[in-house]
Structures are given as structure tokens and as C-alpha cells.
């Protein structure tokens, strides 16, 4: 079992490194250009919406049909709504807590709310992905270490890793849009993926128990991501809509298409 834990750790360290590569795309923005940053912010929201279905809800429904005692549609719906309510509640708690201190007049409170919700939603999304990789490797002893099972676990890790590239950008670029430096934007962007190695080890160690909760966890992350994308990112990228009616919208469409392509192609 220890070998499987090590393999899961190595695999999830790989998926995290690709998140860091995606976050590193922020270095191309030497000075924030509102027009192009709105485009990339739309791209980020499109990525999150597509990932919510193909990376999270669809696998959650499939897993629930295989292992859950509850109907798959009920597991997915409850998880999705729980994730959305969690993000809404988190936003309210953060706003209330900071409302107890002196507020500035430059809109920094609203900006910080958006940043917290964005990083938290992507981080929540990465937890079940890391668990999925850990479960895949942790279950190998049950299959007798056959080549097909090992290749299946590797394929899951590679697929999740490649999907993490645009997700890293989906954090760092909006942070740059909010006025953060390239260095800080990259750091927070890659940090959102650091939970994957931890979740991967946990998944490998507790493969039986974690596998049972994966459908709910995947759906939970989907609900969190949809709420942030619809409530925060899309309105933000449309702030210059009158001057460029479809510019940011094309970013949303392109981001959705890119993530859909990666998810469907990599299975």
C-alpha cells in the first residue's frame, strides 16, 4: 500500500505542477490592459463552467450510479446545491467579518471578496480531483496491479493534469485583472493546486471511504464553481460591454470550448 501512496503523491505533484504552468501565463501581461484582461477573465469563467460539468458533475453521476445507495441524480443535485450554498455562505461570512472593521472607499472590500471566492472555488475543485487520482492508484492492489488498471490510473492523472493548465490561468489572470502583481498572481494561482497532492495521498490511504464520498464531493465543487463564475467572473468581465459588446463573451465561449475539448478528448 505504501508504494501506491508514493505513486499517488508523485502523480498529484505532477498535476499540481501543470496548474503552476497555467498560472505562469500571467507573466505575459507586463501591464494590465483592461480589454485583454476582460477577454481572459471571460476565458476563465468559460473554463470553470465547462469544468463544472465535464470534470465534476458528469463523473459524479457516473460514480454515484456505480457505488451510491442513493439515486445518482439526488447525490449530484444535493452536492451541487451544497457547494453553491457553501460559497454563498462563505461570501456572507467574509463580508460580515470585514464589516466589523474600518472600510475604505476605493472598493477594495468588493475586490477582496471576489479574490477570496475565486481562489476558494478553484481550490475546492482541486480537492476531489486529487482524491480521484489517489483513489485510482490506491485501488490498484485490488486489481492485482494489472497493466490495464495502472494505465487507467496514469490516464486519469494525465487528463486531470492537462485540464489543470487552463484552471491555473483561471486564477492568476483574474487576480492580475484585480491589480495584483504578476508574482503574487502566479503564487496564488499555483497555490490553488497545492491541495491536490494532499488529497491524493488521503485518497490512496482511505480508498474505500473516499471512493464512497467522491460523487458528492465532485458535485459540491461544481456548485461552488458555477456560483463564482456566474455571480463574480462573468459580470466582472462584462464591465466594458458597451465599448466591446462581444469581446469578453468570445472569451467565455473560447474558454468553455477549450475545457470541453480537453475533458472530452482525454475522457
Image (cartoon, helix red, strand yellow):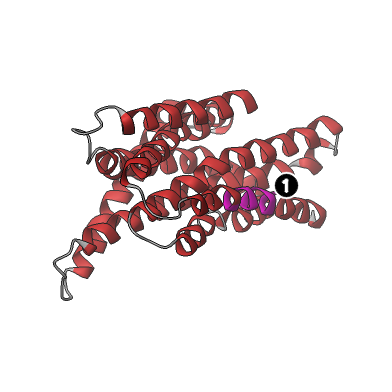
User: Is residue 250 in the magenta section?
Assistant: no
User: Which residue corresponds to the image point at 22% horizontal and 69% vertical from the top-left?
Assistant: 98
The residue indicated by pointer 1 is 138
Which quarter shows the C terminus?
Answer: top right
Residue 118 x, y percent position in the rendering? 37, 51
The answer to whether 214 appears left or right of 108 in the picture is: right
Q: Which range is magenta?
A: 11-20
The answer to whether one can see residue 261 in this image is yes
Classed neighbour count for the residue bearing mark 1: other residues with Cα under 10 Å, few (<14), some (14–19), many (≥20)? many
Q: Is residue 126 above or below residue 226?
A: below
Viewer-side residue, 37 vs 109: 37
Q: Main secondary structure of the magenta part?
A: helix
For the image, the number of numbered tags is 1
Task: Say what secondary structure mark 1 lies in.
Answer: helix
Residue 249 x, y percent position in the rendering? 32, 29
Residue 121 x, y percent position in the rendering? 40, 49
Amino acid at each position: 500500500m505504501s508504494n501506491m501512496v508514493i505513486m499517488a503523491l508523485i502523480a498529484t505533484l505532477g498535476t499540481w505542477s501543470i496548474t503552476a504552468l497555467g498560472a505562469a501565463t500571467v507573466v505575459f501581461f507586463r501591464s494590465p490592459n483592461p480589454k485583454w484582461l476582460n477577454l481572459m477573465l471571460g476565458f476563465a469563467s468559460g473554463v470553470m463552467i465547462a469544468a463544472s460539468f465535464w470534470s465534476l458533475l458528469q463523473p459524479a453521476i457516473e460514480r454515484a450510479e456505480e457505488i451510491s445507495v442513493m439515486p445518482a441524480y439526488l447525490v449530484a443535485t444535493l452536492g451541487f446545491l451544497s457547494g453553491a450554498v457553501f460559497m454563498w455562505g462563505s461570501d456572507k461570512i467574509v463580508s460580515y467579518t470585514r464589516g466589523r472593521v474600518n472600510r475604505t472607499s476605493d472598493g477594495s472590500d468588493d475586490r477582496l471578496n471576489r479574490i477570496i471566492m475565486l481562489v476558494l472555488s478553484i481550490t475546492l475543485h482541486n480537492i476531489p480531483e486529487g482524491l480521484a487520482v489517489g483513489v485510482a492508484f490506491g485501488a490498484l492492489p485490488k486489481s492485482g496491479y494489472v497493466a490495464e488498471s495502472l494505465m487507467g490510473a496514469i490516464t486519469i492523472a494525465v487528463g486531470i493534469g492537462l485540464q489543470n493548465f487552463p484552471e491555473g490561468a483561471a486564477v492568476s489572470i483574474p487576480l492580475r485583472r484585480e491589480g495584483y502583481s504578476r508574482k503574487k498572481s502566479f503564487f496564488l494561482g499555483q497555490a490553488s493546486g497545492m491541495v491536490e497532492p494532499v488529497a491524493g495521498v488521503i485518497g490512496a490511504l482511505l480508498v474505500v471511504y473516499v471512493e464512497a464520498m467522491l460523487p458528492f464531493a465532485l458535485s459540491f465543487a461544481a456548485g461552488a464553481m458555477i456560483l463564482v463564475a456566474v455571480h463574480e467572473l462573468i459580470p466582472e468581465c462584462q464591465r466594458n460591454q458597451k465599448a466591446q459588446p462581444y469581446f469578453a463573451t468570445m472569451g467565455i465561449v473560447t474558454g468553455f470550448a477549450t475545457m470541453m475539448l480537453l475533458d472530452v478528448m482525454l475522457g
